[in-house]
Image (cartoon, rainbow, N blue to C red):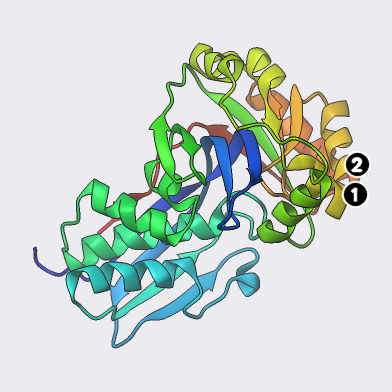
Amino acid sequence: MSAVRTGVTVRVPAKVNAQLAVGAARADGFHDLANVFLAVGLYDEVTATPADELRITCSGPDAAQVPLDATNLAARAAVALAERYGIEPAVHLHIAKDIPVAGGMAGGSADGAAALVACDALWGTGASRDELLAICAELGSDVPFSLVGGAALGTGRGEKLTPIEVGGAFHWVFAVADGGLSTPAVYGEFDRLTAEAEVPEPTASPALLAALRSGDSGVLAAALSNDLQPAALSLRPSLADTLAAGTEAGALAALVSGSGPTTAFLVADGPAARKVADALLASGTCRDARVAPAPARGAHVVTA
């Protein structure tokens, strides 16, 4: 192990699902997925500093909704890494929160990946990329992608990643709803809505993958899809008004982000993003609207 550092800050992006194809429930309760992730430029930062014991603090929007106990994915990441290397997880992890909480943008998963990278650097454990990814997969389905960033196809329950080529920048607007939606509840509603249907095996859309490679926003807009959207709208019908407001303002495409309730709008360029964000705020259908480019870099050290 290398010399112990006094503090490490890691920046980690949110994600949007350009495609979320969901299979039938498995025996273990999970669902097989074809999950096309794009990392977007909304970030949390996790700072790890030495402490007498594991402690979590949080600041920023929605910080009051973030658990500060052992259930936090950042805490679980620190414990998992410490156990692997036979050390005590004596660390203070401070989360500077800017990714919407419980919004379908993998904010908790992002914090887990960031804490893992920060603790690895702080403790000088020298874990390999494969080791970090293995721990990420144990922590949760979206955590590995938060580490990797960029664009990737997630299969299995989303944790098995294949990098995807992206041919240019894409511009997004995210409308943040009041309150969250429970991911298990949304999957449960998906199961209810599809109980009488034959649910096909999830596969990545060739048209969507080609659109990402081309860098053409118009082509990508036509290929976006989210199998969880009907379930999210069933649980939160008001999201339909948000989707309509963004579309009327000129978005090329609108969809629920992951399990929601954040809604995502693909737009042509930066000025269009600002126009759609302003219109969403003026519509009164959301509490905030955020502009972000994609793809973005995965979890990485910014200060040490």
The CA span between labels 1 and 2 is 6 Å
Check the image and report above or below for 158 versus 96: above
Out of 220 and 137, give the one closest to the viewer: 137
Asked which quadrant contains residue 226, the reply is top right
Residue 150 x %, y %:
43, 34
The reply to whether dot 1 and dot 2 touch (C-beta < 8 Å) is yes
Out of 258 and 105, give the one closest to the viewer: 258
Q: Residue at x 45, y 46 (%)?
A: 159
**Quarter of the image that includes the C terminus:** bottom left
Check the image and report above or below for 295 versus 94: above
Q: Residue at x 33, y 50 (%)?
A: 133
Q: Is residue 216 visible?
A: yes
Check the image and report above or below for 203 versus 55: above
Residue 58 x %, y %:
52, 72
In the picture of the structure, the residue carrying the numbered disc 1 is: 238
The image's mark for residue 241 is: 2
> Callout 1, which amino acid?
Ser
Q: Is residue 284 left or right of residue 16?
A: right
Residue 278 x %, y %:
79, 38
Residue 115 x %, y %:
37, 63
Out of 56 and 155, give the one closest to the viewer: 155
Q: Residue at x 50, y 50 (%)?
A: 142
Q: Is residue 268 visible?
A: no
Q: Secondary structure beneath disc 1?
A: loop
Residue farthest left in this picture: 2
Q: Residue at x 76, y 41 (%)?
A: 229
Q: Is residue 117 left or right of residue 192?
A: left
